[in-house]
Image (cartoon, helix red, strand yellow):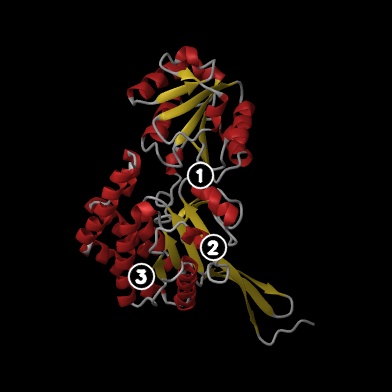
């Protein structure tokens, strides 16, 4: 029996070799392969659902909760969404080979920058089998080979999806092993993957706090991650209150279990008395539990008192915190102390203050009069995203094709010399 360490090293090396061929493939070949992969997902729906049922049965036996089982489930609609995601990526411009910032330099030469693939992307993820297709599509279109490691709870689903994609891609002209999945449930495989510095160029973890922390602490390879999604909406004294109510409801209830959902609402004291009773009724009707600051509680009869811990809680369910603040400065201070640099929103008709908010708030996406739920690769026009990065270097916010590339300098001369 091959050891886990040897298995991971072998798979990573194969993907690295494939990346050298993939990086120079024409756009037409990559797009044809992605189209074939999308068609194969639809054609193989029955077998994918059968494989997924094994994971669901195992998950029920293991006592997975309803939310986890929902994230794990594949059905015809979700498989169609995966296929549509690949078709959308086909329609996006290929960033590879794009030359920009060309400048003439003394000495008779020109210098610019060319976009190039990063190389091999390692994706470590939990629960959602659709990540297998999304990650593969974005990596291949951007010229990157990809090594995938899904969670043990989705091993049958991920294996089936990866095999369908790999077979269809190779038939359409992709090199073998440019898409590979570690077909093991051994936890050691993740640790070994994080040591493959000669084969993997970037690690992207997608999952809960435990996974993100473990990868960050143990990886010898550069990591792009997203931490907690503690997102705020600040309702200023110059806000349209009806807009604030609708935006809050969308931000909290449209899909509460995702990283760009609202977790804490901050309200200027000048509008709190008018806004809170109206908003409280709508939130209660939507089944939202509210943790309120002392000055908000009298206006929210169904709320519970907020604790210090609540301001640092990513609820990920129909639950949220509300605090009344004395000023814009207090709101900014709260966001700086408790935010996770994911998505922050101001609701105001004061243009000058809105521009201050954009400049002064440190987050991957800073928004004016717009729900934090909009911070999404597909919504932003990037296609299926690889994730939302709260890192500061290379890529920040929703990550699409461009964020999966790097740049190199290119120089054009006619015998130019360094005098």
In this picture, residue 169 sits left or right of residue 416: left
Q: Foreground mark, 2 or 3? A: 2
| Image location (x, y in percent) of residue 234 | 53, 30
In this picture, residue 214 sits left or right of residue 279: right
- Reply above or below: 217 against 146: above
Q: Foreground mark, 3 or 1? A: 1
Res 31 label: 3
Cβ atoms at labels 3 and 1 below 8 Å apart: no
Query: Is 164 or 55 nearer to us in this picture?
Result: 55
Residue at (47, 23) in percent of width and height: 291
Give how far apart the Cα atoms at labels 3 and 1 are.
35 Å
**Crowding near pointer 3: few (<14 within 10 Å), some, many (20+)?**
many
Query: Is 149 or 174 nearer to us in this picture?
Result: 149
| Image location (x, y in percent) of residue 177 | 40, 73
Q: Which residue is mark 1?
A: 209
Q: Which residue is mark 2?
A: 202
**Crowding near pointer 2: few (<14 within 10 Å), some, many (20+)?**
many
Cβ atoms at labels 2 and 1 below 8 Å apart: no
Q: Earlier in the sequence, mark 3 or mark 1?
A: 3
- Reply above or below: 160 against 213: below
Q: Quadrant of the N terminus?
A: bottom left
In this picture, residue 188 sits left or right of residue 134: right
Residue at (34, 59) in percent of width and height: 158
Give how far apart the Cα atoms at labels 2 and 3 are.
23 Å
**Crowding near pointer 1: few (<14 within 10 Å), some, many (20+)?**
few
Which residue occupies the extreme right position in the image? 419
Give how far apart the Cα atoms at labels 2 and 1 are.
19 Å
Q: Earlier in the sequence, mark 2 or mark 3?
A: 3
Cβ atoms at labels 2 and 3 below 8 Å apart: no
**Disc 2 element:** strand
């Amino acid at each position: 029996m091959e050891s886990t360490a040897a298995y991971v090293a072998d798979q990573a090396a194969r993907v690295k070799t494939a990346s050298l061929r993939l990086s120079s493939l024409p756009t037409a070949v990559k797009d044809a392969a992605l189209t074939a992969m999308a068609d194969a997902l639809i054609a193989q729906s029955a077998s994918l659902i059968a494989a997924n049922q094994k994971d669901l049965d195992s998950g029920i036996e293991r006592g997975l909760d309803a939310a986890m089982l929902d994230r794990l489930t594949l059905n015809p609609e979700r498989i169609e969404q995966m296929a549509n995601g690949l078709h959308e990526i086909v329609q996006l411009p290929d960033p590879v080979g794009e030359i920009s910032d060309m400048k003439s330099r003394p000495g008779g030469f020109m210098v610019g920058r060319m976009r190039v693939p990063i190389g091999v992307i390692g994706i470590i993820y939990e629960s959602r089998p659709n990540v297998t297709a999304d990650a593969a599509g974005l990596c291949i279109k951007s010229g990157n080979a990809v090594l995938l490691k899904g969670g043990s709870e989705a091993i049958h689903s991920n294996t089936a999806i990866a095999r369908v994609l790999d077979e269809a891609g190779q038939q359409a002209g992709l090199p073998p092993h440019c898409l590979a999945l570690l077909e093991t449930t051994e936890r050691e495989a993740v640790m070994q993957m994080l040591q493959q510095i000669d084969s993997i160029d970037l690690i992207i973890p997608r999952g809960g706090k435990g996974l993100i922390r473990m990868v960050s602490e143990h990886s010898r390879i550069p990591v792009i991650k997203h931490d907690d999604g503690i997102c705020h909406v600040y309702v200023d004294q110059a806000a349209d209150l009806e807009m604030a109510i609708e935006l809050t409801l969308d931000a909290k209830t449209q899909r509460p279990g995702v990283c760009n959902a609202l977790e804490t609402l901050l309200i200027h004291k000048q509008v709190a008395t008018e806004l809170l009773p109206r908003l409280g009724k709508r939130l209660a009707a939507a089944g939202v539990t509210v943790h309120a600051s002392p000055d908000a509680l009298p206006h929210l009869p169904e709320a519970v008192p907020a604790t210090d811990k609540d301001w640092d809680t990513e609820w990920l369910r129909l639950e949220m915190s509300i605090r009344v603040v004395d000023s814009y400065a207090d709101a900014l201070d709260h966001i700086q102390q408790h935010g996770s640099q994911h998505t922050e929103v101001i609701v105001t008709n004061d243009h000058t203050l809105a521009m201050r908010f954009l400049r002064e708030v440190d987050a991957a996406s800073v928004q004016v009069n717009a729900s934090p739920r909009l911070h999404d690769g597909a919504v932003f026009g990037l296609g299926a995203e690889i994730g939302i990065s709260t890192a500061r270097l290379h890529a920040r916010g929703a990550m699409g094709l461009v964020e999966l590339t790097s740049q190199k300098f290119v120089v054009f001369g006619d015998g130019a010399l360094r005098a």
